[in-house]
Image: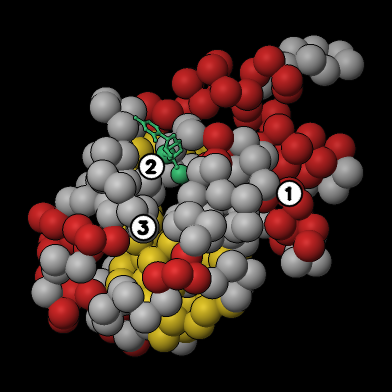
Amino acid sequence: MSMEIRMIGTGQAFAKKYFNNNALVTCNGYTLMIDFGITAPLAMYQMNVPLDAIDGVFVTHLHADHIGGFEELMLRLKFNYNKKPTLFIEENLVSPFWEHSLRGGLEFGADSRQKLDDFFHIVTLKVGVPMEIHPGFRLEILPTRHFLDMPSYSVIINEQLFYSGDTVFDPELIRAVHERGCMYLLHDCQLEGHGLVHATLAELLTLPDTIQQKIWLMHYGDNMDQYIGKTGPMTFLLQHETYSFPIKASATKNE
Ligand SMILES: Nc1ccn([C@@H]2O[C@@H]3COP(=O)(O)O[C@H]3[C@H]2O)c(=O)n1
Ligand SMILES: [Zn+2]
Ligand SMILES: [Zn+2]
């Protein structure tokens, strides 16, 4: 069995050559969108992927390159597609997501004030509590250090694939997911400068080769092509590409 990941975008927040770092993950017939930033509607359109291909959406954190496309997603799914997907979100993010990021553009309805659960089935995730969101498709969220005390979450899918939300370089976290048996580590990467809110390439290059071999770089700047061949054993994920990651049989209950 394998897990398919389509990179809707691979760019950092303000990249202009690359769309926001968002991904569509399909496993066992279920399609989960990880984040839906400002550029996601255009990226999906250019890839000819309809919005109703999304069964569920997971939010890592509330920066606009990760949630800025939600107003369009929600309005079009509700009114164009008549579809109510599932929102997977850490329990403490639900209120700020609606109250601070979405409500102004979405609460007005013809008959009554709209709420988040008029658009989504809401499923809250807790740190340390893995959840099977669909047969053979499991999520476990991990808190990650991003910007000051802003909550941000990474996710492990089917115990095999680690997908970082935005995070500073956190070698303990990376070692822990490596030692837990994750085979694929998809990690945000700032190519130059100091790593105040993201892991830099220079920091990631300090990891042992055995870990770097598992790392796929994403969330990078417009000058990524200048760094091809300079990432050690790490590999760049490419925008609009689809990756098929084989999953060990022992990690999947429903094969
Ligand atoms: N102290 C900060 C805080 C934020 N930022 C930029 O804002 C972006 C928000 O989205 P992001 O993907 O987390 O990347 C952040 C930085 O580029 C930054 O460069 N320095
Ligand atoms: Zn980001
Ligand atoms: Zn961020």
Residue 30 x, y percent position in the rendering: 59, 66
Crowding at dot 2, Cα within 10 Å, few <14 / some 14-19 / many 20+, comes out as many
Crowding at dot 3, Cα within 10 Å, few <14 / some 14-19 / many 20+, comes out as many
Which mark is nearer the camera, 1 or 2?
A: 1
In the image, what residue type sits under mark 2? Answer: Leu
Whether the residues at callouts 1 and 2 have beta carbons within 8 Å, the answer is no
Residue 58 x, y percent position in the rendering: 50, 48
Of labels 3 and 2, earlier in sequence is 2
Whether the residues at callouts 3 and 1 have beta carbons within 8 Å, the answer is no
Tell me the SS state at disc 2.
strand
Of labels 3 and 1, earlier in sequence is 1
Which mark is nearer the camera, 3 or 2?
A: 3
In this view of the protein, can residue 185 be seen by the observer? Answer: yes
Image disc number at residue 125: 2
Of labels 1 and 2, earlier in sequence is 1
Picture quadrant of residue 238:
bottom right
The residue at which mark 1 appears reads as 41
Whether the residues at callouts 3 and 2 have beta carbons within 8 Å, the answer is no
Residue at (71% x, 57% y) in the render: 43
In the image, what residue type sits under mark 3? Answer: Leu
Query: Cα distance, mark 3 to mark 2?
Result: 31 Å
In the image, residue 198 sits, relative to residue 173, either above or below, namely above
Residue 55 x, y percent position in the rendering: 64, 56
In the image, residue 141 sits, relative to residue 120, either above or below, namely below
In the image, residue 54 sits, relative to residue 110, either above or below, namely below
Residue at (31% x, 32% y) in the render: 147
Left/right placement of residue 3 relative to residue 202 reads: right
In the image, residue 137 sits, relative to residue 38, either above or below, namely below
Q: Nearer the viewer, residue 213 or 59?
A: 213
Tell me the SS state at disc 3.
loop
In this view of the protein, can residue 214 be seen by the observer? Answer: no
